[in-house]
Amino acid sequence: MESSLRFLRHWAEVLPVFALQGLIALLPLMWVPRIGEFLGWLAFDILHFRRGVSLRNLALATGDRYSDQERVRLGREAYRSFGSLAMEFLAMNRIPLERMERHMVLENIEALWSALREGKGVLLVTGHFGNWELTAAAMNAAGIPLSVYVGRQRNPIFDKLINGIRRRAGSETVHKSVVMKGFLKSLKANRVMAILADQHDTQKRYYVSYFGRPVSAAPGPATIARRTGSPIVFMASIREGRFRYRSVFRRLDYEVTDDAERDILTITQKLFHELESEVSRHPGQYFWMHNRWRPIPPSVQLSEINRAFLAGRVAAEHLPPRAPEPS
C-alpha cells in the first residue's frame, strides 16, 4: 500500500513537468524563456517560495552594497533567471547541434582543449550560476567528451526525465553513488568531468571563505586533482539575453605539497574565489535560494590548519571557539 501511494505521489509531482514539456514543444523556441520568467516571478512575488532565504543570502553576501529594495529586485531577477533555465532545459533537445552556437558562445574553449591534450582528463568546476545545462549541451556540440556529476533525485520518474535530457544532449552522467569510481574512470578515459561544487557539504570537513563568511565546501574536485594531477578548469555561464549565454573557461593553476589538508583548502578556495567574482558581477543570475551560509555548528571542531587558513579571510566572530585543552 505504501509503495503504491509513493508511486502515485511521484507521478502527481512530475505530471506538471510533462505538461510544461508538452506546451514547450508547441511554442516557438524564443517564447520558452518567457514562461520561465513568469514562473520565477510567481514563485518569488506571489508564492514567496524560499524568498526569505534568498534575500537573507543576498544580504549576507553583499552587505551594504545594495539597499533592501535593490536586493528584492535582484532576488526577483534570480528567480526569473532560474525559471528561464528550467524551461530552456526542457526545450534543450529541440536545438539542432549546428545551431547551438546561436544560443551559447563558448569563450576561451581552447583552455579545455589544451588541458585535454595533456591526457589526464579535465575537472571542470562551476556553480549554480547562469545556465550550466545549456553549456554542457554546447560543449557536446563542439565535440568535447563530457561527463557530468549528478545527484540522484528523490523522485525516480523526475530523475529519469532530467538525465534522459542530459544524455540526449550528449552528456555521460555519473551518479553520486559511484562518485569516486565514476570520476576516476572518466578522467582515465581523458574526458571532461563536470561538477557544480558550490553547495553545502553535509560532512562539514573543510571550510573556506565565500563572500567573507565560512562555508562548508565539498573537497571532491581538489582531492581528485591532487590524486590524479588532472587540470582544473573553472567555468562561468553568463546570461546575455533570452536563450542566449556566454560561457567563459579559465584554467586554475594549483600546486601539490606534502600537506594534503592545506592543498585541498587552497585549491577549493581558489574555485570559490572565481565563483565569487562572477556572482559579484552578475548577482541576478545566481541560485540564492539554496541555504548556503550556515553558521559553523558548535559540534564542529575546526582543525588548526583550517582555522589558520580562515584567519584573515573571515571575521573571528564567525568561527567556533576552540575545543578546551584536555586537563
Image (cartoon, rainbow, N blue to C red):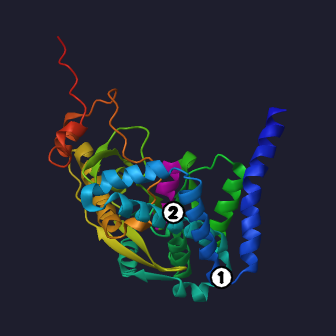
Q: Is residue 240 visible?
A: yes
Residue placed most toward the observer, 53 or 256: 53
Residue at image coords 44%, 53%? 54
The percent position of residue 175, horizontal first and vertical second, equals: 57, 52
Is residue 77 found left or right of 63 in the rendered image? right
Element class at badge 1: helix
Residue type, mark 2 in image: Tyr
Chain part drawn in magenta: 179-190
Residue at image coords 47%, 53%? 289
- Judge whether 27 appears above or below 147 on screen: below
Residue at image coords 60%, 49%? 152
Residue found farthest to the front: 69
Residue placed most toward the observer, 155 or 28: 28
Q: Is residue 286 visible?
A: no
The percent position of residue 327, horizontal first and vertical second, equals: 17, 10
Q: Which residue is mark 2?
A: 79
- Residue 297 location, quadrant: top left
- Residue 325 location, quadrant: top left
CB under 8 Å between callouts 2 and 1? Answer: no
Q: Residues within 10 Å of mark 1 (few under 14, many from 20)?
A: some
Whether 310 is among the magenta residues is no
Q: Which residue is mark 1?
A: 29
Residue placed most toward the observer, 146 or 326: 326
First in residue order: circle 2 vs circle 1: 1
Question: In the rendered image, which quarter contains the N terminus?
Answer: top right
Element class at badge 2: helix
